[in-house]
Amino acid sequence: MAAPSAVLQSEWTKVRSVRSTVWTLVAALGATVVISGLLCLLTNVQWKNIDEGGRATFDPTTTSLSGLILGQLALIVFGVLVISSEYSTGMIRTSLAAVPQRGTFYAAKVAVTGVLALVVGMSTSFLSFFIGQALLGSHNTSISDTGVLRAVFGGGVYMTLMVLFAVGVATILRSPMLSLGILMPFFFLISPILAAVPGAKIVARYFPDRAGSKIMQVVAVDDGRPYGPWTGLLIMAAWVAAALIGGYVSLKRRDA
Amino acid sequence: MIELQALTKRYGSKTAVDHLSFSVRPGVVTGFLGPNGAGKSTTMRMILGLDNPTSGDVTIDGKHYAQLSDPFTYIGALLDAKAMHGGRSAYNHLLCLAQANRIPRARVDEVLETVGLTAVAKQRSKGFSLGMGQRLGIAGALLGDPKILMFDEPVNGLDPEGIHWIRNLMKSLAAQGRTVFVSSHLMSEMALTAEHLIVIGRGQLLADTSMADFIEQNSRSYVRVRTPQPEQLKDALAVAGLTPVEVEDGSLELQDADTAKIGELAAANQLVLHELSPQRASLEEAFMRLTAESVEYHAGVPSEAGQPAGQQPEGPSAPAWGAAWQEQQDKKQKKGKS
Amino acid sequence: MIEAAGLTKRYGAKTAVYNLSFQVRPGAVTGFLGPNGSGKSTTMRMILGLDAPSEGRATIGGLPYRELPNAPRRVGALLDAKAVHGGRSARQHLLCVAQLSGIPARRVDEVLGVVGLQEVAHRRSKGFSLGMGQRLGIAGALLGDPEVLLFDEPVNGLDPEGIHWVRNLMRRLASEGRTVFVSSHLMSEMALTADHLIVIGRGQLLADMSVKDFIAHNSAGYALVRTPDDPAQGEKLTAALTKAGGHAQAEPDGRLRVSGLELRQISELAHEADVRLWELSPHQASLEEAYMRMTNNAVDYRSTQDRRAGLAPMTEVVR
């Protein structure tokens, strides 16, 4: 059987040797930090124009992580490419000939992708937080305040889960075009829109991004979500598990 | 040794591979022939465990592909040269394959040198020409120094030197006792390389013999004779019950004759011969004859099944080509007889 | 007729083609040979007016391609079979090409019939296999019923029947009096198809002669002789042949490999020595052997400045 460490090494080589893959991670970090920073700066500058209600519900932590709405798209691209580029280039046949034990192959790929996502995710989250707080000036918060560490740490976990969700979906769909064509519009448009629509809200709350993002909320807001931050993350994790399992079954059963 | 037992692959109602049974033995180069859509690629993919058989079995020295640890050290294959990530360098492509099979890094440099790609090793494979991509694929097959090698259209894109090199490589690998399994459309190349042939058509086995037997069984051999005394020779042959065919260039052709016999006959009659050569049909002629004869194959609906999802079959047009060839051969035969 | 006169192409400091002069005549299949990077594609592109020469001229029927009135009707080319929009059907693709050159639509159906694609004519070419794409490319080249045809690696991706068909097609076109210029790496195919050869290396002309002459020039023909099993016969013959100035070598299968003497001479010497012959067959080196020998003798053509072409030759597997 294939030695797991050997396959892990191989998957790591695969990821680090393609420049475009590396760039998606840089883009994720960049987009998140820059946009969060801009929003924080704007808030700081415009503070006097914000009404009482706004000020009361203002969440400096969430604001400093808001760039994620865009950054996560780059992460989705990363997750999708890691597996679907194997199919689009035809490399999958060579890979599965090299590692015919498909479970091992999949696990190694998910592991390498996950670890990389975690590292980048955490870095992005903390960096974004600290830069954002600096730009918020006097309206900021501190990492030691209640719930803030949980939120920032949770942000890193959120990003990791997002990547893994994309991996699972892309393994099932195989085509990068199809995977991105579904995931990008969904997370960028459909999910936020449905979350605002009265009837659909009830279901949209349980979407992975909706549920998972609760972890990054520090200031308690009654947005109707019947779960707490950790439960929300768990709901997202359930989605991810389903996607990854679906991917495994698909990979194992189908012809290469 | 690769062993297939009643290997079958169906895609819905279409049967791509139909109860194929044969063995590919070490020590000889075995050629795998068949028209497009015959099921060659599907068969090769099933050997590597990439596609699941519908029924039947394929084993490599008794084991299934998935049971092999570090499979590349056991069996190396070149199926599709362009099946690599363009954004990755040649070196890194081979490295990730080597790592997955616990093959030392140094080996990557070795095979790159063997195929002559050292100079471009660090360049992204996207910019590679077809020939370079092919060389990289060959390097991948050689990486683990395996006992068994499978090549699908190995000379595709190579220049004459490369073609010459790979042919000799395959022969030397076989001479070393390894198993070499080659699939190709180029009859002329195959004739120079393979010693044993496995021919399939429409997913079914059509032949599994040595090269020599194959040609003999599927074509007619004849002897060409040139002599300054044709009339006397014809008389002498007539006495022996042999009727030569006269060819435009002045030579005589005798079907299925024995050169020694003719030589003796000429000597006995004090006749001088300027040429007495046995003519064997080419592999191509033998192949065409065999596949043209499988009537079901040519008429009507083609074997589309040989293609994996997403590809369109060559099928519908195949009859047009075969029929024309058959016509030509018939014309040639008629001409010879007159 | 295609004519190259002092054709030269430089890309900055690199010279891809230098002072190339040759003629490709009608009525024969002319093969264009050379290693990768020798300038074959560059030359073909210049002939088709895709690249402008740095010096010299490439003409078809006396005029450069770009100056030909209604070029598609005079010249057909198959250069890159995959250069077709996948979304279009085979028929539509050809129709586009036809309309651009004022070729009637019925010709499209004609050529589709010739290459055997009539049944898949309405399918989008994206799904075509390499072989079908190749056939489509050939159909495109034949569309204008041109006098001059250029093919670059025409049998790429074709199955044995297809290879056979293309070979016969080219010979037929040549016999109709057209000019057929084929570039290919497959020596064995070339040997069966071409009548005349133009060989280039490192951008320069290496040979321009008939296939027969090329083989004769670059290799030694020989005869294989078999005598009755009695060893005395073999010895007698060997002695006689050697005395007459020939060279006889015993082959592992018992036959004699004789060079330096014509078949007729061998036969007569055998007759005089009272040795019976059980086989007397002429053998020619293959085109490939001749080509290898010729290119090995020519000035080192391998290390050109084109980095892609300067790939090291494949080495023996070291065990």
Image (cartoon, coloured by chain):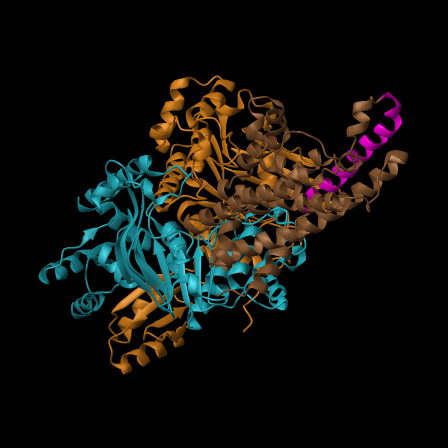
Chain colours: A brown, B cyan, C orange
Residue closest to the eye, C66 or B182: B182
Residue C40 appears in the figure: no
Residue in the foreground of this view, choosing between C48 and B261: C48
Task: Tell me the residue at 47%/55% (across/down).
Answer: B154
Residue in the picture at 60% in, 59% down: A8
Task: Name the magenta segment's main secondary structure.
Answer: helix
The location of residue C251, given as percent across then percent down, is 37, 74
> Hey, which residue is sitting farthest right in the picture?
A138
Residue B281 location, x and y as percent? 28, 55
Q: Residue at x 40, y 28 (%)?
A: C123
How far across and how far down the image is residue B131, in percent? 55, 50
Q: Examine the rendered structure and indicate whether residue A191 appears above or below residue C185.
A: above
- Which quadrant of the figure has residue C193? top left
Does the stretch in magenta take in A35? yes
The residue located at (64%, 56%) in the rendering is A13
Q: Which residues are magenta?
A: A21-49
Magenta residue check for A115? no
